[in-house]
């Protein structure tokens, strides 16, 4: 009996370590929704390569606009055509994958005009995509895990949107993520990320020559990474393009270079969360996630 007790005492810290590791384990995030040729959401989740999928994008919202879900060639939200993805979202979640709705994007029409506007958008998101209820849920009855901020224009009142969304976490946890550009601080998301409410910050280390990888040079990327891990983000992910075509202004890191040079330089950070890939379509072409998943 005594030896069993001693064994229990020895094993308990190991159990705690494994518990901690699993709750903050590294993973791969991907954006899905911007190319009808990338396959279904279920196809993406069934690769078993991703721990997070951002559905992109809610491209219009705020400032009196009717919120608009734009999933490129996948479906027409205006005619309720995107509700078909409800069961696929639930199937992804059943596999332990977090599915978030991404706001904004590079070509959207969005802004927040006031604190009140931020509150109204938060209420809309809660009732139409999260744990609330509405007669017009664009993705059906599935309850998404959270909201991703891919804000590339404007920036005022997005801190208040984050706070309002976080307020709903008392009813059901709303995960918050953000996709800032790698120059620190981000021009559009700094005030939001500074709230300390963002669980995951996947930084875009591409289309930004001053802080991206280029022909053997990792120094600019690592310097920017160190600034981001000193921010209020809870976890920081390295955002990369899946191939050259995914990032017209550069930043593609060949998978062997990512594994041998970049990841060893950044994984030591306590805030390291993993890798974000733009996007599912390009990843399907290059199979980048297949090449890196055991190293992330």
Image (tube, rainbow, N blue to C red):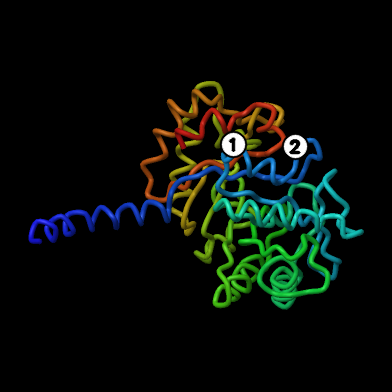
Q: Mark 2 points at which residue?
A: 38
Residue 251 relative to residue 18: left or right: right
- Residue placed at 17% from the left, 54% from the top? 10
Q: Position of residue 34 (x, y in %)?
A: 77, 43
- Residue placed at 56% from the left, 48% from the top? 202
Q: In which quarter of the image is residue 206?
A: top right
- Residue placed at 59% from the left, 66% from the top? 174
* 263 to 31, vertically: above or below: above
* 132 to 111, vertically: above or below: below
* 262 to 10, vertically: above or below: above
Which is more toward the observer, 278 or 107? 278
Which is more toward the observer, 146 or 140? 140
Which is more toward the observer, 54 or 91? 91
The disc label shown at residue 75, or none: none
Q: Mark 1 points at which residue?
A: 240
**Which element is circle 2 on?**
helix
In the displayed orientation, state which residue is furthest to the left: 2
Q: Residues within 10 Å of mark 2 (few under 14, many from 20)?
A: many
């Amino acid at each position: 009996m005594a030896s069993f007790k001693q064994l229990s005492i020895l094993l308990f810290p190991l159990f705690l370590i494994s518990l901690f590791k699993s709750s903050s384990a590294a993973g791969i995030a991907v954006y899905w929704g911007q190319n009808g040729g990338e396959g279904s959401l279920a196809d993406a989740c069934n690769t078993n390569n991703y721990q997070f999928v951002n559905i992109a994008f809610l491209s219009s919202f705020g400032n009196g606009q009717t919120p608009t879900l734009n999933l490129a060639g996948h479906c027409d939200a205006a005619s309720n055509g995107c509700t078909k993805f409800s069961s696929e979202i639930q199937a992804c979640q059943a596999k332990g994958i977090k599915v978030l709705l991404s706001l904004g994007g590079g070509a959207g029409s969005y802004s927040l005009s006031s604190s009140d506007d931020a509150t109204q958008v938060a209420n809309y998101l809660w009732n139409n995509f999260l744990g609330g209820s509405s007669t017009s849920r664009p993705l059906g009855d599935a309850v998404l895990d959270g909201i991703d901020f891919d804000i590339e224009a404007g920036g005022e009142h997005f801190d208040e949107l984050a706070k309002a969304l976080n307020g709903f976490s008392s009813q059901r946890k709303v995960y918050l993520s953000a996709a800032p550009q790698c120059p620190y601080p981000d021009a559009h998301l700094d005030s939001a990320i500074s709230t300390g409410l963002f669980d995951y910050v996947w930084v875009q280390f591409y289309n930004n020559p001053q802080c991206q990888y280029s022909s053997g040079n990792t120094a600019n990327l690592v310097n920017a990474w160190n600034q981001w891990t000193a921010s209020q983000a809870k976890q920081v992910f390295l955002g990369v393009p899946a191939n050259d075509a995914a990032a017209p202004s550069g930043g593609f890191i060949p998978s062997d270079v990512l594994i041998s040079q970049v990841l060893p330089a950044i994984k030591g950070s306590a805030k390291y969360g993993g890798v974000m890939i733009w996007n599912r379509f390009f990843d399907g072409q290059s199979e980048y996630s297949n090449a890196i998943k055991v190293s992330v």
